[in-house]
Image (cartoon, rainbow, N blue to C red):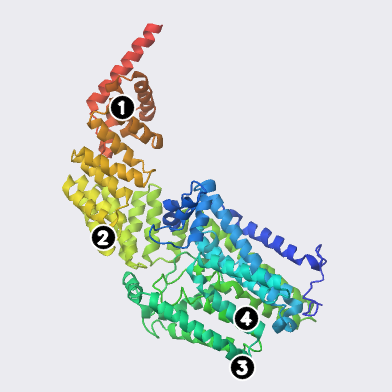
């Protein structure tokens, strides 16, 4: 029979003896996780991956020298250290394989696997503590194994594993559970050396967690709660003893927090949100209940990157607000009530709510993200597994019911794994991700705007415009910055696709009114004026923008371009050279430098810079046409012939005049504007010379 006394043994002879349970667990976890996450290793960059990794020059680590490593600590802002270990991990990925997504996904997978291993170790060793050993000891392995598998394979964890930038959440979770495990080992150590070793490892893990993500701040409270409930035991004496220590510490931390926290800036953060502080506090209980439901019932149709949540404006609007608050209060009260008799269950309940406090309370963050459950859900499945094993034990005299329960466990595990596999699939491309999100949240603006961006990057401009317009008409943004981005995207469509510069400028102005700190909108507005020939107005916008963003390579380049059009060549050269110093990979600056030298008669320098530009954009027609003119002026016939031959392959069956004039009509405003007649004459002379030389050789 399968009972608690025999450790819920299925009477199946495993090839591993009891002494090798750890090995079996670690291997089984790895195999199962690699099966369900194996299709995630080539998933594309998504959403916040781009500003934090792909476009974040601070993590482009070229050497392992200390100055270069230190630079990564200041990502993404040069004036602020932010989550340094997270960004250092991205930088190390870049150092070994630049922006190849495989390496980033591999590291994310390893982090999740190690988190699962340490979670198992922590649960398994916790179940051997004197406070719970008598009740759960014989079943400790089964409880730890099943609870870990449920957590590790939960589809809710996909956004913390497959979504690359959310390594911040998973790596923070790894250090969190490592610190708790090392605390447990040190706290129960019999020898002084072990106590010091595990104590040191606990402190190092905790410090690493704090340097990874801010929500690790709840770790000391979690450890204190764990110690009180599962090691000391909940007695009146222990509570009094702990309060004598805890209350002064809490008061000191609170006072320090009051001294260093700028509450006015905290409230300012809500100006960019479509909800107030009160509305957020009323809405979050409903979100917490939603988190519980998707952990229990994680089908694909309920999971997405950006959720559509109705904001609670009062206790009764919507009606579910007050019941959600009531359920949370009841669950916390229940956990407190059973703390003495069922300390493990009590800890699991309190741990879940405690670790949602930072991201689900008063901070002006987005309302909901699934990855926020990575740490809080670590012990979520322990009470569920205990209940399942209780049912198996209760029906120990009916083997059919027992095997049915085992089959249910296997089915649930397989269903979760399948959902994880399917969810990974939509991260293969932004178009898949946002199409899925739009389908699940059809009345939310932000997914439509992001879907439009995915279409735009693929060259489907009309589809992009339709998605952008839909986002604007819905007018349900998660913050005002998103509205600014939406308006900017519509401006870009009219700037580059329809050529309606007045309409483009109107959208850029609206974007800046909504989102004044949006650099790209300022640049777009300046370019729209340049296209209209209003260079002076464009310059004013750019100079004003540079007062706010003096280190923007884009703005310096655009200003240099405007100065080039004004024929202020020295000033133009100064700006684009500065642009290149700020971003050495900014190739567009090279063509402006080349054109400045061409106009000043420095043909050899102009050739040099056009060639550098064409190394990065070899098919650029403007650069190749410029070289044809320059090679002709310098009498460089060999390079001239090679460039003409290259253009002949590019133009195909088109005539030279049609080929060049189509380029001129497609280019809104060019750095180098070729003289069509001169270029055709140079090409004709060169081709005639080649025919003459070939005839002479014959």
> What residue does disc 3 label?
236
The answer to whether residue 36 is seen in the rendering is: yes
Residue positioned 46% across, 81% down in the render: 252
Camera-side mark, 2 or 4? 4
At mark 4, the secondary structure is: helix
User: How dense is the environment of label 4, judged by Cα within 10 Å: few (below 14), some, or many (20 and up)?
Assistant: some
Where does the N terminus fall, quadrant-wise?
Answer: bottom right
**Sequence-first tag of 2 and 4:** 4
At mark 3, the secondary structure is: helix
User: How dense is the environment of label 1, judged by Cα within 10 Å: few (below 14), some, or many (20 and up)?
Assistant: some
Q: Is residue 56 left or right of residue 218?
A: left
Quadrant in the picture for residue 114: bottom right
Q: CA distance from mark 3 to mark 2?
A: 60 Å
Q: CA distance from mark 1 to mark 2?
A: 42 Å
Q: Nearer the viewer, residue 457 or 194?
A: 194
> What residue does disc 1 label?
604
The answer to whether residue 412 is seen in the rendering is: no
> What residue does disc 2 label?
512
């Amino acid at each position: 029979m399968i009972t608690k006394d025999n450790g819920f043994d299925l009477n199946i002879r495993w090839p591993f003896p009891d002494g090798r349970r750890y090995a079996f667990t670690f291997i089984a976890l790895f195999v199962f996780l690699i099966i369900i996450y194996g299709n995630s290793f080539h998933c594309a960059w998504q959403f916040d991956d781009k500003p934090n990794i792909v476009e974040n020059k601070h993590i482009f680590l070229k050497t392992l020298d200390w100055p270069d490593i230190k630079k990564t600590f200041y990502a993404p802002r040069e004036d602020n250290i932010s989550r340094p270990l997270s960004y250092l991990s991205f930088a190390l990925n870049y150092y070994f394989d630049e922006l190849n997504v495989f390496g980033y996904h591999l590291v994310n997978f390893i982090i999740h696997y190690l988190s699962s291993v340490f979670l198992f170790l922590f649960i398994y060793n916790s179940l051997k503590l004197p406070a719970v050993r008598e009740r759960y000891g014989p079943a400790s392995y089964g409880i730890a194994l099943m609870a870990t598998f449920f957590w590790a394979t939960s589809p809710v964890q996909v956004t913390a594993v497959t979504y690359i930038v959310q390594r911040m959440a998973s790596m923070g979770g790894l250090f969190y559970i490592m610190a708790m495990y090392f605390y447990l080992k040190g706290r129960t150590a019999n020898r002084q050396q072990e106590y010091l070793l595990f104590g040191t490892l606990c402190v190092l893990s905790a410090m690493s967690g704090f340097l990874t993500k801010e929500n690790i701040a709840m770790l000391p409270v979690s450890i204190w709660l764990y110690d009180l409930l599962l090691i000391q035991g909940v007695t009146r004496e222990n509570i009094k003893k702990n309060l004598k220590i805890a209350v002064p510490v809490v008061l000191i931390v609170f006072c320090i927090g009051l001294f260093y926290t700028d509450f006015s800036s905290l409230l300012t953060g809500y100006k960019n949100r479509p909800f107030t502080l009160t509305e957020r506090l009323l809405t979050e209980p409903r979100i917490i209940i939603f988190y519980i439901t998707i952990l229990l019932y994680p089908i694909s149709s309920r999971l997405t990157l950006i959720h559509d949540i109705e904001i609670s404006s009062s206790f009764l609007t919507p009606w579910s607000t007050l019941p959600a608050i009531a359920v949370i209060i009841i669950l916390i009260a229940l956990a407190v009530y059973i703390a003495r008799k069922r300390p493990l269950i009590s800890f699991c309940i309190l741990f879940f709510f405690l670790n949602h406090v930072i991201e689900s309370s008063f901070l002006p963050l987005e309302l909901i993200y699934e990855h926020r459950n990575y740490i809080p859900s670590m012990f979520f499945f322990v009470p569920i597994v205990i209940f399942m094993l209780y049912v198996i034990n209760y029906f120990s005299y009916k083997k059919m019911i027992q095997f049915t329960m085992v089959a249910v466990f296997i089915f649930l595990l397989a269903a979760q794994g399948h959902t994880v596999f399917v969810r990974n699939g939509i991260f293969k491309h932004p178009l898949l991700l946002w199409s899925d999100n739009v389908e699940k949240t059809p009345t939310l603006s932000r997914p439509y705007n992001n879907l439009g961006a995915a279409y735009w990057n693929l060259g489907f401009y009309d589809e992009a415009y339709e998605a952008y317009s839909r986002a604007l008409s819905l007018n349900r943004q998660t913050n005002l910055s998103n509205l600014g981005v939406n308006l900017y995207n519509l401006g870009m469509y009219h700037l580059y696709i329809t050529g309606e510069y007045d309409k483009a400028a109107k959208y850029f102005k609206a974007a800046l009114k909504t989102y004044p700190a949006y650099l790209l909108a300022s640049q777009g507005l300046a370019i729209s004026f340049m296209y209209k020939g209003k260079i002076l107005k464009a310059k004013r916008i750019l100079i004003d923008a540079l007062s706010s963003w003096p280190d923007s390579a884009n703005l310096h380049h655009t200003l240099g371009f405007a100065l080039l059009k004004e024929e202020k060549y020295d000033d133009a050269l100064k700006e684009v050279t500065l642009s290149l110093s700020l971003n050495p990979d900014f190739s567009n600056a090279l063509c402006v430098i080349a054109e400045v030298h061409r106009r000043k008669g420095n043909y050899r320098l102009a050739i040099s810079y056009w060639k550098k530009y064409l190394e990065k954009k070899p098919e650029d027609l403007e650069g190749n046409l410029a070289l044809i003119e320059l090679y002709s002026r310098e009498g460089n016939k060999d390079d001239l012939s090679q460039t003409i031959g290259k253009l002949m392959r590019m133009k195909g069956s088109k005539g030279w005049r049609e080929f060049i004039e189509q380029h001129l009509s497609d280019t809104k405003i060019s750095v180098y504007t070729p003289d069509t007649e001169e270029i055709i004459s140079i090409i004709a002379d060169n081709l005639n010379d080649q025919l003459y030389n070939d005839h002479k050789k014959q």
